[in-house]
Every structure is written in C-alpha cells, then in structure tokens.
Amino acid sequence: MRLSYPSNIKVIQVPCSGRVDILHLLKAIEDGADGVYIAGCLEGECHFLTGNLKARRRVNYVKKVLEELGMEPGRVEMFNLSAGEGPRFVEIAKEMTERIRALGPSPLRMDEAA
Amino acid sequence: MTELKSGSNLEKVLKAGHFAFTGECGPPKGANVEHLREKIAHLKGVVDAVNVTDNQTAVVRMSSWAASTIMLQEGVEPNFQMVCRDRNRLAIMSDILGVSAMGIRNMLCLSGDHQRFGNHPQAKNVYDIDSMQLISLVRKMRDQGLFENDEEIDVPPRLFVGAAANPFAEPHEFRVYRLAKKIAAGADFIQTQCIYNMDRFRNFMKQAVDMGLHEKCYILAGVTPMKSVGMAKYMAKMVPGMDVPDALIQRLQGAGKGQVAEEGIRFALEQIEEFKEMEGVAGVHLMAIEWEHKVPEIAERAGVLPRPQV
Amino acid sequence: MIVADRKPLAEILDMIKDMDKILIIGCKGCVTVCNVGGAKEVGILASVLKIARKKDGRPLHVDERTLERQCDPEYIEQVKDVVDEYDGVISMACGVGPQFLSQAYPNQRFFPAVNTTFYGGAVQHGIWEERCAGCGQCVIHYFGGMCPIARCSKSLLNGPCGGSAGGKCEISKDVDCIWDMIVRKKMAEGRLEDLMDVKPAKSWDTARDGGPRRAVREELVQ
C-alpha cells in the first residue's frame, strides 16, 4: 500500500499471533525495548481459531508482571486487526509510538540515557 | 424416656409435657461480666433455659462454658453450646466434664461456622470430630460412662443433649433424614434454625412426624423476630440456609414508619401460636439476638408466662 | 499431583537481594504439570528477575536448569559440579525439592520460588482443585468416590452442615459443597441408607497430625 509507519517499530513476523510466547515479550523488555505489542487477527477470525485469544492472555500476563515490578503495564499491548487493514496497521503503530513516547524510555535504559 | 438423663430444668419441663420456651444469649466480646449479667437478667424467669453461644460466626467472645457458669450463678439455666471448629476431642471431652462439674446440664452440639466468617480467619481449623460424632460422644460419656477410647470415666457427666436442625438447608430432601440421624446418634432435643417459611416447615414437620421422630426426641421450633426490613432482606440474601418469603418482606414494608419491629413481633407471635398446636413441636426456641430486653414482652404476649415450675 | 503457586515477585527479589549470580532449578514433575515450575516457567522467572534488577541498576546473572524431579537423590546429584558457583539457588519445585537440595548441598543456600499448596488435579486447562488431604486412611468409597476430608471445608464425615447454598460451600462460591454432591449421588442411586449410619470419629494419627510420616517398601530396601 506504500503507507509509511513510524521507523522506530521493529516488525517480527509470525505465522500466527498465538506463536508469540510470554518469554518473547519478556525478552524484548529485558533487552531494552521501550514497548512491545502484538498485532493479531480480529477475534473470531483467527485461522488457527484461538491463537489470537492466547496471545491476548499472554499479553495480560506480562502486563501483570510489569505491574508487580513497578513498571508501566502499557508498555506491552495487544491489538486486533484484519490482514487487509493497511491503514489500521499504521494507526496502531502510531498509537503505540505516541503512548510509549509519553511513558518515556524503558526504565531498563536509565543508565544508558544517563 | 423414663428416668431423667440430666435433671435439667429443660428436660423436666419437656418430660412433663409442657410447651417449652428457650432463649439465647451471646457472651460479650470481652470479660465484661456486668454486661453479661444485664443480658441474663432480662431472661430470668421468662424462659426454661438459655442457649449460650460458642464463638458464634467464628468471632471470639468469652467462652461459652464461662458464660454458662456465670448464668448459673445468676439463677438462670444455661444451654451450653459447643462447636467442633475450635477444639479437638481431648479438649471437647475435658470441657464436657468441666461443664458438668460446674452444674451445667444442657448441651447443644454444633459443627460451627467456618473460621473464614469470623474475625480471625487465619486460625488453624480443628474439626477433629463433627457434630454428629459429638452427639454420639456425649451420649457415650453420659450413658456408658466411657471416654471415646472406651476408658472409664470417674463420675460420668450428666447432660441433656441437644442438636440443631435446619429444615431449609440443602439438599432439602435430605434434611429430615439428617434429623433422624442426629436423633439416632443420641440427640435428646433439637432446636431448629429460625423459621419464616411456615408452609415449608409444616411440610418438614409432617415428614418428621411420619417418621416418628417426635416420639424419640423433643423438637423445638426456632423463632427470630424481624426488627427491620433491612434485617429481613439481609437474612434472605446473605445468610445461607435461610428461607425468608417475599410475602413476609412485603408485610414488613407495608407496616408503616416506626411500626416494622412491632409487625415483626406480631408475625413471631402468630408463629408461636401455631407451633403450640403443631404436631411434633414440643416448644419454641426464641433467638432475639441483641434484643434480649424484648423477650419478657414477647413471652408475655405469646401467653407462655408464667413458665412451669417442675 | 502436587500443586503450587509462584511466590510474589517482591518476595523472591527480596530473597536474592544480596546476590549477583544465581541458578534457578526447575522440575519436570508436578510443577511442570501445573505450569508453575517447569523449564518454561524457569525461563520466565529468569527473564523477570533480570528485568527487575536491570531496572534497579543492579544486573543479575541467572542460569537455568531443569531436573527430572527434585525428590530423588539421583537427580539432585546432577547439579553437584555447578551448585557452588552461585551466590544462591532458587528452586521452583514443590517444598520437597529445596529441602532435598539443602540436604545434599549444605554449603549452598536454597530458596523456594513457589508456595506448595495441595494434592489435586486439573478440572479445566489452567485450573486445578484440591482433591486429597493425605489423611493416610482413604475412605472415598464410602462417599460415592468423593473425599469429604479434603473437599468439605469442615472435613465432616456426617455432613452436610446446612450452610451450603446452590450447591456451593458457605465459605465461597468457588467451592462446591461436596456433601451436596455426595447426598445427591446417593439419592440418585437409591442408596441413601449408606449415609444413615453415624460414621465414627476419624483416626488422625495416620495424617500429618500423627507426626511426620514415612513409607517403607521392605522388598526394595537393600
């Protein structure tokens, strides 16, 4: 579609959002990502039926962990959209970028920033 | 039912065929003997025996045996309640001997509300034996003069053994069988939970009478006068095993400002009148909790005064 | 199997607060089955602890290892060459694991990452419930195949107590009234008389009440 989305998003493609594990999300945070999100298919439209539902539950688990550690749960998020919704993909990318910008860099990068 | 098992006033009243009338009194949340004596004073001469609760709803209060002893000193006959939640069989048997030694002659055997309801939910749960086994145990101690392990008791306790029955608990079909089981285990008398649904209770009593239970055991019907619409609604929704018909709630609501408590008492009085005539019902157990000062009035209006001297 | 729940992260972080290098040992037994202490959960905890410490500017080195079980010396032995390299070791096994480790390696400190709770099974993927109290005298066959010691809040043998509502225990809507279930089953089977005899007081001496227990198979002891 030749739409552009913010350059700070690193996209990792998976065959289904259900392939994303809790550990993937945690490792992203651990390695210094300011935010991480999963873009999965609309609920009810998962090719593998429940992959995107599992993904959402895993995102919720990681949110709870972040809260327990005194970090912002908003740094991790689940979004649902259809593969054909190019503009929505861009919208989500921008929304998440704005949110993370407002939250500031990950607390794990404090010493880097300093 | 020939010779007296305990010689308690309650036993004598029931044995003589009178319609019994018992009350209830919760010990204070402290060693406040004065307050306890005040509550007891309201009940003196007005009831045949007074239930003394045992850490009711798992809230810590002065022990039931101590409050019962004080009650005895005030010239009122206690009905000592014991729950299985807080003590093991050693302490249970020990307390049974203790209360008997102090002159207490009635005992009500209960399981006890789980400590999660109370004010010390982190306490260890005992329930070494259950209420059914407790009934059997007291009977064994009294009639056979033996401890649970079959050792002989040096002067057995003399207690009139009671148990509770809830006609409205679930599964409903089983309740009359559970009552039969408690009687077979050794219950001399039964006090039911407070009744509001008279139709269902009539049905329950009919089943009990059909099974001949009223001939083996004295059944006392529980009555608690409703003080307010709030109380009625709370009991309808929040208290397990309680059946409060909508018709009663509406009746209380229609009573008019400041008249609800009086209407609640009127309903209780109607119940008592019916219980006097109901086959199988040997008396009434009035639970006017924290309303002890109303009991003399209710007793008067119910026509159960003076209490028989036996 | 034995079911456990992971301790709050604050509690675990407090255990290792003076340490820079730790080992987390998981177990492929019960705690894997209830998804709290297997290899995957070890990985997750390792990452979480590293995140927490990085955030506080005190990086933590974490190694991961998962043993077949932590309740047998032959598996405990497998970490003997590495166990002393760490400031401390976290075990994600049930309460048995860290104790076996502590005994085998008296010079090292072991910390439990989970709170062991009950013997139970899965009622649904992700949900486990208590079924057995380990009383040492199984009597489920008297109660339609259900255990009132473990599943009745008051461990009544002559229930129900009358506090249940809608088939749920008075203490919580999440707890079934097992006596409601037992009575209904007996009624459905036409065997209500099985419940009419007074079950006598239980002997608790075979339960934990009688003291710590031991099982011996003489035919196996050398």
Image: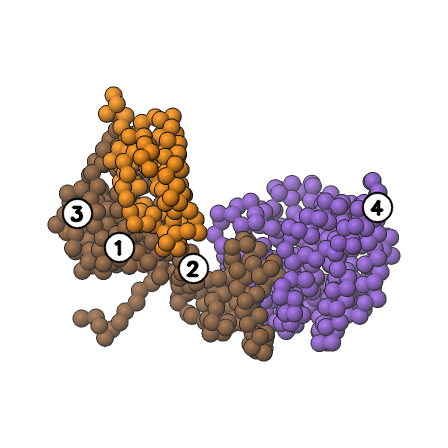
Chain colours: A orange, B purple, C brown
State the mark number for residue B255. 4
**Residue drawn 31% across and 64% down?**
C214
Q: Secondary structure at mark 4?
A: loop
Q: Give how far across and how far down residue C51 sits, in percent.
A: 28, 36
How packed mark 4 is, by other alpha carbons closer than 10 Å (few <14, some 14-19, many 20 or more), is some
Q: Is residue B119 above or below residue B14?
A: above
Real-space Cα distance between discs 3 and 4? 77 Å
Q: Amino acid at mark 3?
A: Val
How packed mark 1 is, by other alpha carbons closer than 10 Å (few <14, some 14-19, many 20 or more), is many
State the mark number for residue C67. none
**Residue drawn 23% across and 25% down?**
A112
Q: Amino acid at mark 1?
A: Cys
The mark lying in front, picked from 3 and 4, is 4
Read off the chain for label 1: C
Q: Give how far across and how far down residue C200 sits, in percent.
A: 52, 71
Q: Amino acid at mark 2?
A: Gln
